[in-house]
Image (spheres, rainbow, N blue to C red):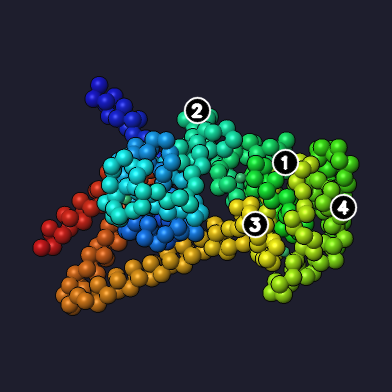
């Protein structure tokens, strides 16, 4: 009976199977991911004082503001909403911390209590209530059989399931053989009408033109493109690759402008300092009336090709998409800065460790080094005696430390 008890106890143990190497890699990857979302912010200070940040990690506390019309910064999430029901929103653009303002019904901010009653330029989509996508489901979704990753629209910043973005086939999402996205950014079908002017740009801005040529042609010849417009999808661009119009189906603007675009292709790739409009037609004369509503998949660096002339800049501002020409708005740039900050932080940590060692006297140094050596030896003998097919448990780790402690006692 006692034996049964032990077996049962072991069966109850559901520790995940990992090797120590995998475990350490996992911690490293998790830290990197956290640092990327936090943008290198160490989360000690409320960001309110810095005003509307171009991009930052934002959290919504449903305990304090159940209707989800407020957001707080990382530091506030940790210091002021510990233990609350918090929705993690990844990053949002142009946001200022609301913690403790008039929306919080008397719950004060511990870090930066002096705040205006509201931040009028903040916008709050359904994500702040913990709902995502056109289906308005939570993430993770307790009713879903498996949690699928969602993709974020770079205009509305909502997150979408790939099968809820108005495509008749998931094959139309540009991905490589491993299923990794071939696109840099995604514009959802709800936001794409605002961006219909993009069809005035050369095909290099579409991620879909990176897709294998035969794939695109097959899809088109199968009639999957809903070819009622009768528009041919087999035109060639100057490299001889078929032009993929799957995301820019409407032809009314295109027919007027195709020539201009081809003629100005090279100038579009060139510098943008001349003050002339890159697209060669007045952006305001474009119309989205008959636009087939489709999500758009953008190529790497597409934002840099956007015209920044006065007319186009006004156009973006009127439609609330001025952020597209701001380099610091992109997730790519945000993550780049986060990585730089992280590297600096790691360097400083290494420096601090070296300084610590250097500040010790000779005897202390020897003691620490011999301690490290004992640890190494103990670890090594554990690894050698350990059955590699078995999982390392917390008991195993504890026994390493017990052995170390025993050795210390013997030595002293
Ligand atoms: Zn804050
Ligand atoms: Zn709270
Ligand atoms: Zn706070
Ligand atoms: Zn959905
Ligand atoms: Zn959108
Ligand atoms: Zn322009």
Secondary structure under tag 1 reads loop
Q: Nearer the viewer, mark 1 or mark 2?
A: 1
Q: Earlier in the sequence, mark 2 or mark 4?
A: 2
Q: Residue furthest top?
A: 1
The residues bearing labels 1 and 2 have C-alpha atoms spaced at a distance of 29 Å
Q: Earlier in the sequence, mark 3 or mark 4?
A: 4
Residue labelled with disc 3 = 316
The residues bearing labels 3 and 1 have C-alpha atoms spaced at a distance of 20 Å
**Quadrant of the image occupied by residue 114:** bottom left
**Quadrant of the image occupied by residue 62:** top left
Q: Are marks 3 and 4 in contact (CB under 8 Å)?
A: no
Q: Earlier in the sequence, mark 4 or mark 1?
A: 4
Q: From the viewer's perspective, is 47 left or right of 357?
A: right
Q: Residue at x 83, y 43 (%)?
A: 220
Residue labelled with disc 4 = 255
The residues bearing labels 2 and 3 have C-alpha atoms spaced at a distance of 39 Å
Residue 329 visible, this orientation: yes
Residue labelled with disc 1 = 293
In the rendered image, the vertical position of residue 172 relative to residue 364, given as above or below: above
Secondary structure under tag 2 reads loop
The residues bearing labels 2 and 4 have C-alpha atoms spaced at a distance of 47 Å
Q: Residue at x 72, y 41 (%)?
A: 293
Q: Tell whether circle 4 marks a residue whose Cβ is less than 8 angstroms from ligand 6.
A: no
Coordinates of residue 199 in the picture (x, y in percent): 76, 53
Coordinates of residue 82 in the picture (x, y in percent): 30, 44
Q: Which of marks 3 and 1 is nearer the N terminus?
A: 1
Q: Residue 143 carries which label?
A: 2
Q: Do the residues labelled 4 and 1 touch (CB within 8 Å)?
A: no
- Total residue callouts: 4
Coordinates of residue 344 in the picture (x, y in percent): 41, 69
Q: Which of marks 3 and 1 is in front?
A: 3
């Amino acid at each position: 009976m006692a034996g049964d008890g032990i077996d049962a106890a072991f069966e109850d143990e559901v520790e995940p199977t990992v090797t120590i190497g995998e475990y350490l890699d996992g911690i490293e990857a998790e830290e990197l991911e956290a640092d990327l979302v936090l943008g290198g912010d160490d989360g000690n200070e409320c960001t309110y004082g810095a005003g509307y940040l171009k991009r930052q990690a934002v959290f919504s506390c449903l305990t304090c503001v159940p209707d989800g019309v407020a957001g707080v910064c990382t530091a506030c999430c940790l210091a002021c909403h510990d233990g609350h029901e918090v929705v993690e929103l990844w990053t949002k653009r142009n946001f200022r911390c609301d913690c403790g303002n008039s929306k919080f019904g008397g719950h004060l901010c511990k870090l930066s209590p002096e705040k205006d009653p509201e931040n009028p330029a903040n916008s709050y989509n359904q994500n702040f209530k913990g709902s995502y996508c056109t289906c308005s489901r939570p993430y993770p979704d307790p009713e879903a059989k498996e949690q699928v990753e969602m993709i974020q629209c770079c205009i509305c910043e909502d997150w979408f399931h790939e099968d809820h973005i108005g495509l008749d086939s998931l094959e139309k999402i540009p991905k490589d053989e491993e299923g990794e996205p071939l696109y840099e950014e995604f514009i959802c079908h709800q936001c794409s009408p605002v961006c219909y002017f993009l069809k005035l740009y050369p095909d290099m801005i579409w991620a879909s033109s990176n897709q294998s040529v035969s794939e695109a042609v097959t899809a088109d010849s199968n009639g999957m493109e809903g070819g009622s417009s009768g528009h041919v999808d087999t035109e060639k661009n100057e490299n001889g690759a078929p032009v993929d119009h799957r995301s820019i189906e409407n032809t009314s603007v295109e027919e007027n402008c195709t020539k201009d675009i081809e003629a100005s292709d090279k100038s579009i790739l060139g510098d943008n300092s001349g003050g002339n409009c890159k697209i060669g037609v007045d952006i305001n004369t474009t119309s989205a009336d008959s636009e087939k509503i489709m999500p758009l998949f953008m190529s790497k660096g597409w934002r840099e090709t956007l015209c920044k002339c006065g007319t186009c800049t006004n156009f973006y501002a009127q439609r609330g998409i001025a952020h597209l020409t701001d380099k610091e708005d992109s997730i790519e740039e945000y993550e780049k800065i986060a990585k730089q900050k992280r590297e600096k932080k790691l360097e400083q940590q290494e420096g601090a460790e070296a300084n610590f060692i250097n500040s010790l006297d000779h005897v202390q140094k020897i003691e620490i080094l011999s301690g490290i050596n004992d640890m190494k030896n103990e670890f090594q003998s554990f690894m050698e005696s350990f059955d590699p097919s078995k999982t390392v448990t917390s008991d195993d780790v504890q026994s390493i430390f017990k052995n170390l402690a025993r050795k210390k006692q013997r030595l002293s």
